[in-house]
Amino acid sequence: MQSERPLKVLILAAEIVPFAKVGGLADVVGALPKALQALGHDVRLVMPRYRQVDPNRFHLQPILEAVPVSMGNYQVQVSVCRGEIGDHIPVYMIDAPRYFDRENIYGYTDDGERFILLCRAALETVQALNWSPDVVHCNDWHTGIVPNWMQTIYRDNAFFANTASVYTIHNLAYHGIFGYRLLEVAGVATNGFLYPQIAEFGNVVDIMGRGILFADTVTTVSERYAQEILTPTFGEKLDHLLRSRRDRLFGILNGIDYQEINPATDGYIHTQFDAQSLERRIENKVALQEQMHVPVREDVPLLAMISRLTDQKGFDLLGQIIQPLLAQGIQFVLLGIGDQHYHEMFQSLAARYPEQVAIFLTFNTELARRIYAGSDMFLMPSRFEPCGTSQMNAMRYGCVPIVRQVGGLADTVQEYDPSSGDGNGFVFKNYDPWEFFAAVVRAMALYRFKDIWRTLQQRGMEADHSWNASAKRYVEVYRNAIEYHGTNA
Ligand code: GLC
């Protein structure tokens, strides 16, 4: 059947594991392609060649030189090298030192230009390689201009005539807001601002909004978040636009990489284990307590957070309950990097409670795995959470999640119900310190009942959060977008 043919999918993203990662976006874009490939599709990726992407370590091969890329009224020459993920899935890296040979991935006044360049160079690259995609799958604001182009400057380009665009929102909080000049750089100034369709009031360009408006299909990373963002509370001023596109909006829960994230084979952790040999897990708790320089105590609940330190993640709620929890004797470990005021908050906490608290203000995959494997409970009191990956990682390692009932957290964690025995964690509803505190207290109470606790752990470990099911849904969405694109052409 014609519609069942394998698809050519071009995926664009600002971060991809293992090359560069700031948040969960990189995990998703590093894992989904492997699952798509396993279903028989031809997937290729494009990202910038940042300074931190070491050509030797990743065996990058130069493939294109001096590709001219138009940036409005000037041109930039880029070169392209090829890396790989999975089973020879190409990752084309745009090499443009003036834009990407920098200390960090984000946080520059010309971020708008930098990612316009990435997108334009991506489309030029596949043309130079004569590989015409069926779908261009864009992720977050960095690549949101592409659907806009597909309906403007690339509209009459025969090479992309059959290319449908899919735009995935990983985090609606980052819009990519810039001044008028960016429209000129992107070559789409003709229509000016798009208020009131998009929240481009105040005469600014909103790239996230443009992605949502122009894509053939819009997705986000959990079903619950797809509903939430239609409301003013979670819509980040784009709820109106999203409601107008609700028939083109789908929620697909992220998976995690079950090959990588696996306590039975993980080389980073002290002792490997699985759901049938949970008794071995304790070795990891001991090793973690040693690394934390806190007393090695099997019976003390060890609570963990691994997260970007931003307002989204609910650190102010944690700040309000952590001292009463410490007063009950718990231990707490934090791994993450982010906003300075949270660094300071945790530094002073660690200084006050050296026997109970250890903080690692960094990003470190090895340590993350040791924390998942060694701690008892995993906290995610997020204000909003499009999907969240850490709660799934934690469950896979037998660490029981305590989460707020939002977005992907609500879709993956269910409160333990003492009467039916169902559930895999602890959940609270409102963004409220008392509710959060109560959820932790319920968890600590159950923690004493080792058999039931073990059941909760096993349930988390045996749940299927692999990419298989979600990748199939993406394929459906891709086909659906292609059909929609065809009828709209
Ligand atoms: C963003 C969201 C997070 C999601 C991730 C991957 O980081 O905040 O909830 O899991 O993207 O989609």
Image: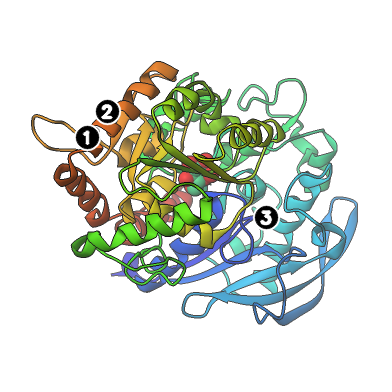
Q: Residue 196, relative to residue 162: is it above or below?
A: above
Asked whether disc 2 touches disc 1, contact meaning CB atoms under 8 Å apart, the reply is: yes
Say which residue appears at 40% left-offset and 32% top-offset: 329
Q: Amino acid at mark 3?
A: Tyr
Q: Residue 152, percent across and down?
A: 68, 47
Is residue 13 among the parts visible in the rendering?
yes
Say which residue appears at 79% left-offset and 39% top-offset: 189
Q: Amino acid at mark 1?
A: Leu
Q: Which residue is mark 1?
A: 446
| Number of the front mark, 1 or 3 | 1
Mark 2, other Cα within 10 Å: few <14 / some 14–19 / many ≥20: some
Closer to the chain start, of discs 1 and 3, is 3
Q: Which residue is mark 3?
A: 154
Image quadrant in which the N terminus is located: bottom left
Q: Give me the C-alpha separation between circle 1 and circle 3.
A: 58 Å
Say which residue appears at 63% left-offset and 76% top-offset: 83
For the residue labelled by badge 3, is the local secondary structure a helix, a strand or a loop?
loop
**Direction left: furthest residue:** 420
Q: Amino acid at mark 2?
A: Arg
